Amino acid sequence: MMQSPVPHELPIYRRIADRLRQAIQAGEFHDGDRLPGENALMAEYGIARATARQALSVLINEGVAVPRRGSGVYVRQFRPIRRHGSRRLSRERWGTGRAIWDGDTAGRPYTVDELEIAREPAVDEAARVLGCAEVWVRRRRYSVDGRPVQLAASCFPAELVEGSPVTRPDTGPGGVYARLRDLGHAPAHFTEEVRARMPAPEERDRLGLSAGTPVIVVCRTAFAAGGEAVELNTMIMDAASYVLQYDFDA
Amino acid sequence: MMQSPVPHELPIYRRIADRLRQAIQAGEFHDGDRLPGENALMAEYGIARATARQALSVLINEGVAVPRRGSGVYVRQFRPIRRHGSRRLSRERWGTGRAIWDGDTAGRPYTVDELEIAREPAVDEAARVLGCAEVWVRRRRYSVDGRPVQLAASCFPAELVEGSPVTRPDTGPGGVYARLRDLGHAPAHFTEEVRARMPAPEERDRLGLSAGTPVIVVCRTAFAAGGEAVELNTMIMDAASYVLQYDFDA
DNA sequence: GTGCGGGACATCTCTAGAGAAATCAATGTT
DNA sequence: AACATTGATTTCTCTAGAGATGTCCCGCAC
């Protein structure tokens, strides 16, 4: 018996997903528009709710659409990342089930485990970017449903934050940035680089990962104001959760 | 009405997925082991088939497990990528629904569109890595279900492949490597780098993407034998499909 | 207006069942 | 020894329905 060279007809949910994706790419839907929901698809194609859900979940998994319980499924598109100039990093335009940048991932908020905050000698890139000999390093782990998804290390120039609330272990989320804003240092500049690699043993332990778990390093995000660097952020994320989600304006 | 600070109890499918993931990380399952299937989970937890499927799909989406219709759901683990030495790149150990390296993605094979193969002057990295002035470039696009997922450009030293079947447009998949092996050049060395960025207009057109679609560039994979470089491969992949899937032995 | 309640609406979770399709092992045939 | 068939197992696709939960908005009370 020979294998048919042409695969069998695509399943319904996949054909519907393809049609919606093509409609998006054809410009019929734009960023923020609401896609036809489960009920609409059920009526239009005469299918069961589960099948309509499956069609939408394809686009959601791809990062093309974003569900919002009670509100609908929305189109998400990306804008190009520009390399120079002043811009703002928005991390919360749309929540997604797989994006770990957002505090609300499909109804499940992440938790932030404050692992440590300590004064350390600046090494390598931190010294170069921040231009200082000593930094305060704050390491935090983000978990969703108890599963660690991201390890972030933020470096601040020691002379900038010394004696400020930044160096206190109980500084809550956003507290550092509020403090920096008070000091006149708004996030204004960034550089970016992404590398794929396996986690070093030390990072692996902090993330609580088993040996061999793949990660993606999203690193070297530098914030500065008026030409003066104030933070160097290094993020380590697992590959399965990684989805590009930058959105800059101005 | 206040928002409860503690989220409601996790749904069943998620608790089961967590339990399985912890079992994997605890070493109860190893790479290639079969996980309890839908029927086993239905019996063990007294749930419906759809719920059991949902639990497994969590792990499958994370890249931790790989389903195989008719055969079961298997554990997939990764080994560290080493930086130096001789090793073999295996692209087909396990098929996944999201991995685009495999010809068989959950029953849906990808198609390879041969876009062009042409002799070009070696530029930038190709000249440096391959050490030649002219190269043959072969550009191919990979699609799954009609959706383009990867654009690959392979450079070969002109003097190496000149007059060989490699330069013929109808060279099938794998044909180039077979030819190179005949010439005594087995894939033996690689370097790797991953960058996130938006596609350039030219690449966007070749991939058939709409403006603003996020991609990840997996690039600079150099193959060599006996210290002589024979290929420089540049791959452009969409972020949603990207999953680390390297597996080296020896 | 400001806040609160309620209704409409949409997604999320789950149940129960059934036929299709792929895999694998065992069996039979040539 | 090589090949074809069969059957058991398992995942894949889909139907039909129902209660829970979150979002949005309108209208009412203060």
Image: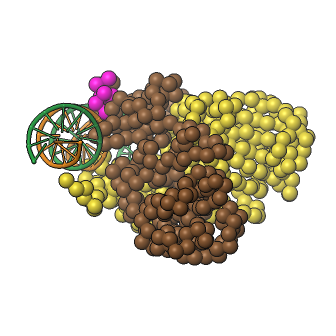
Chain colours: A yellow, B brown, C green, D orange
Magenta segment's dominant SS is helix
Residue D1: x %, y % from top left: 23, 42
Instruction: Say which quarter of the image contains residue A109.
Output: top right
On screen, B44 above or below A247?
A: above
Q: In the image, is A246 to the left or to the right of A158?
A: left
User: Which residues are drawn in magenta?
Assistant: B38-44
Q: Tell me if residue B97 can be seen.
A: yes
Asked whether B172 or A101 is in front, the reply is: B172
User: Measuring 64% from the left and 32% from the top, which residue is drawn there?
Assistant: A204
Residue A200: x %, y % from top left: 67, 35
Q: In the image, is C13 to the left or to the right of A204?
A: left
User: Measuring 60% from the left and 39% from the top, which residue is drawn there?
Assistant: B80
Question: Looking at the image, how many numbered discs can be counted on the residues?
Answer: 0
Residue B51: x %, y % from top left: 33, 35
- Residue B39 sits inside the magenta stretch: yes
Q: In the image, is B61 to the left or to the right of B89?
A: left
On screen, A81 above or below B51?
A: below
User: Measuring 35% from the left and 29% from the top, which residue is drawn there?
Assistant: B36
Instruction: Say which quarter of the image contains residue B15.
Output: top left
Asked whether A187 or A198 is in front, the reply is: A198
On screen, C30 above or below B4?
A: below
- Residue B57 sits inside the magenta stretch: no
Q: Tell me if residue A114 can be seen.
A: no
